[in-house]
Image (cartoon, rainbow, N blue to C red):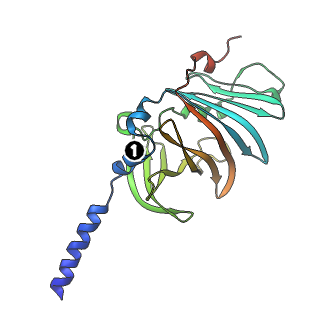
């Protein structure tokens, strides 16, 4: 009997070792099923069109991104066009709701999260960027079993990314706010409705929650990749 139990333990350990996955394998599988790591490395620009919902309001938006960290969001609210952008040096906006149609430097508190964004996924070639990752077991998200990956960035910032154990796609990104009334609090961004775009798989629905309450939803209707975007499109307009 003891010999049988010992043999069973050895076999069970062997099966577990065969099925166990490392953090690197989980991340590599994610990039593999969403387009391939070479395609993600070669990605030049993204343009996303859709609808944002926040504070009881719905408004159309177009989001542009280009490397290394340029971004621009054009939003239509009640017939007015609001622009928020970062050209790699200056975060600026055009906010007609503040009584001006001219571009102005964005307040520091609002500019901070824009300046921290990077075009390339932080998990892509993470080690070369000075980041590290670790597998922190599993977590169930709304009935879906997920691998929980902890990402520690070069500056010490910690994020958590949860990947569906079956499909290997990203289900939740958990990040901490660095400014504003929610500073230090972790928000969960849920990603779903993955669709194919030029060989990539992108989530077309994103919902951000704070303490379980929805603070923003983004429903995308179109995504295009590798459109030519001039630097001037992102640059802070010179008066």
The residue sitting at the top extreme is 239
Badge 1 crowding class, 10 Å Cα cut-off, few under 14, some 14 to 19, many 20 or more, is some
Along the line of sight, which residue is nearer the eye, 203 or 183?
A: 203
Give the percent coordinates (x, y) of residue 43.
47, 30
State the residue at coordinates (65%, 48%).
Answer: 182
- What secondary structure is found at the residue carrying circle 1? helix
Q: Quadrant of residue 5?
A: bottom left
The residue sitting at the bottom extreme is 1
Give the percent coordinates (x, y) of residue 189.
59, 49
State the residue at coordinates (49%, 47%).
Answer: 159
The residue sitting at the left extreme is 3
Vertical comparison of 16 with 160: above or below: below
Total numbered circles: 1
Q: Is residue 17 visible?
A: yes
Vertical comparison of 32 with 99: above or below: below
Along the line of sight, which residue is nearer the eye, 228 or 106?
A: 228
Give the percent coordinates (x, y) of residue 233.
63, 19
| Quadrant of image for the C terminus | top right
Left or right placement of residue 229 versus residue 52 in this view:
left
Give the percent coordinates (x, y) of residue 123.
43, 41
Residue located beneath label 1 in the image: 32
Q: Is residue 130 visible?
A: no
State the residue at coordinates (71%, 41%).
Answer: 51
Along the line of sight, which residue is nearer the eye, 14 or 161?
A: 14
């Amino acid at each position: 009997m003891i010999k049988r139990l010992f043999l069973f333990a050895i076999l069970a350990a062997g099966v577990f070792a065969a099925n166990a996955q490392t953090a690197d394998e989980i991340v590599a599988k994610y990039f593999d099923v969403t387009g391939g790591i070479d395609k993600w490395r070669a990605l030049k620009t993204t343009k996303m069109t859709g609808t944002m919902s926040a504070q009881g309001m719905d408004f159309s938006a177009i989001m542009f991104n280009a490397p290394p960290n340029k971004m621009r969001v054009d939003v239509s609210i009640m017939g007015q066009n609001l622009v928020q952008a970062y050209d790699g040096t200056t975060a600026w906006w055009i906010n007609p709701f503040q009584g001006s149609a001219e571009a102005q430097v964005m307040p520091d508190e609002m500019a901070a999260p824009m300046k921290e964004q990077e075009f390339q996924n932080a998990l892509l070639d993470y080690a070369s960027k000075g980041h590290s990752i670790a597998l922190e077991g599993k977590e169930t998200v709304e009935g879906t079993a997920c691998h929980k990956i902890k990402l520690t960035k070069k500056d010490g910032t910690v994020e958590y990314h949860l990947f569906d154990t079956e499909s290997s796609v990203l289900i939740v990104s958990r990040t901490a706010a660095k400014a504003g009334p929610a500073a230090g609090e972790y928000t969960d961004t849920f990603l779903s409705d993955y669709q194919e775009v030029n060989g990539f798989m992108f989530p077309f629905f994103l919902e951000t929650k704070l303490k379980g309450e929805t603070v923003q939803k983004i429903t995308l209707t179109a995504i295009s990749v590798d459109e030519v975007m001039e630097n001037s499109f992102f640059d802070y307009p010179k008066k």
